[in-house]
Image: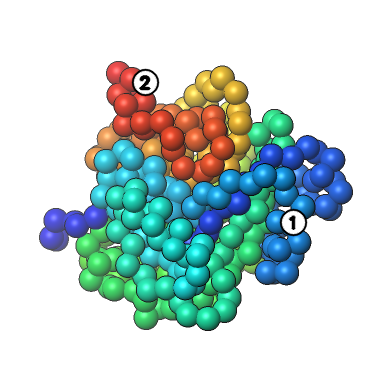
Amino acid sequence: MSEPKYDVIAIGNAIVDVMAPCDDELITLLGMVRGGMLLIDEAEAERLYGMMGPAKEISGGSAANTLAGLAALGASCAFIGQVAEDQLGEVFAHDIRAGGIAFDTPARAGEPATARCLIYVTPDGQRTMNTFLGASQFLPASALNDAVIASARVLYLEGYLWDPEEPRAAMRRAIAASRNAGRKVALTLSDSFVIARHANDFRALLEEGQIDILFCNEDELHTMTGERDFEAGVASLAPRVPILVVTRSAKGAIAVAGDERAEVAAEPVEKVVDTTGAGDLFAAGFLAGHVRDLPLATCLRMGAIAAAEVISHYGARPEANLAALMDERLG
């Protein structure tokens, strides 16, 4: 097998996050589920944007956020995702390339516009997301370069993008390219609503041995397995995948790899400002350790450190020097 060009190549939604603080009353007034994520159309995106206070625009998207963390930790990365030929598309492309991540997917002409996620952040740091997927859900399989995908040590797939038909086909092609080259495939389940719609697909991928690393949170574990008890859910899912990583918010996280199990407590945070991207950055820290062949427990700790950094400020991408943080806290 040839030496990989990239540590991680990811396929995901190319989204610009539009974030604004708000009080709990506004969440209720707008009829949103506090802490949830809702898919909306462009008209609703415009309406909700009009209800926001002063907002901050930050390039986002789950897999892109993970790559931002990985790049900050010294990993070589590339991203595949669809933007439109518009201002937000230019913002996204500039931001991801400025982070040292290769991004060559051509912009899409015409409608719909580049995806955006309107994020309302309450005083306790909880985020309520309203996502217009726009151009991101029209990523064609033809945009993929099989040779580039095969050149990455790990292919990382964003579960959110499994929902639309066109990018789902692209991701299936990418899995084949990666596995044919003897590389690893990682999948984040993203959200319980995605699992509810595509659980059979995900179970089939696991049964076929197509996934090497599976990321999920406690709610997603329950939806995927149907088990109310956490340990029962882990016992049900872990034997189906070489590495299972389950995040538990303030309760930390666990990872199971065959007969090995590791656990980590959540890193202390002085103040939780915004939980956007916590899972994305956890995956970044974990994968940064994994591509260096570090022990499972160390990979978990790196995930916890990266997640703690991102929830200490607005936005889903790191602001502190993550590499320095790792050196300081891992010793």
At 65% from the left edge and 34% from the top edge, which residue is drawn?
125
Q: Residue at x 14, y 60 (%)?
A: 1
Q: Measuring 37% from the left and 73% from the top, which residue is drawn there?
A: 106
Where is mark 2, residue-wise?
329
> Considering depth in this image, is 42 or 147 the residue closer to the camera?
42
Number of residues whose C-alpha sits closer than 10 Å to that of mark 2, classed few (under 14), some (14–19) or many (20 or more) = few
> Picture coordinates of residue 83 (x, y %)?
47, 68
| Quarter of the view holding residue 300 | top left
The residue that mark 1 highlights is 50
User: Which residue shows up at 31% across the image and 38% down it?
Assistant: 73
Disc 2 is placed on an element classified as helix
Q: Is residue 305 above or below residue 120?
A: above
- Asked whether residue 137 is in view, the answer is no
Q: Which mark is residue 26?
A: none
Q: Earlier in the sequence, mark 1 or mark 2?
A: 1
Q: Residue extending furthest left?
A: 2
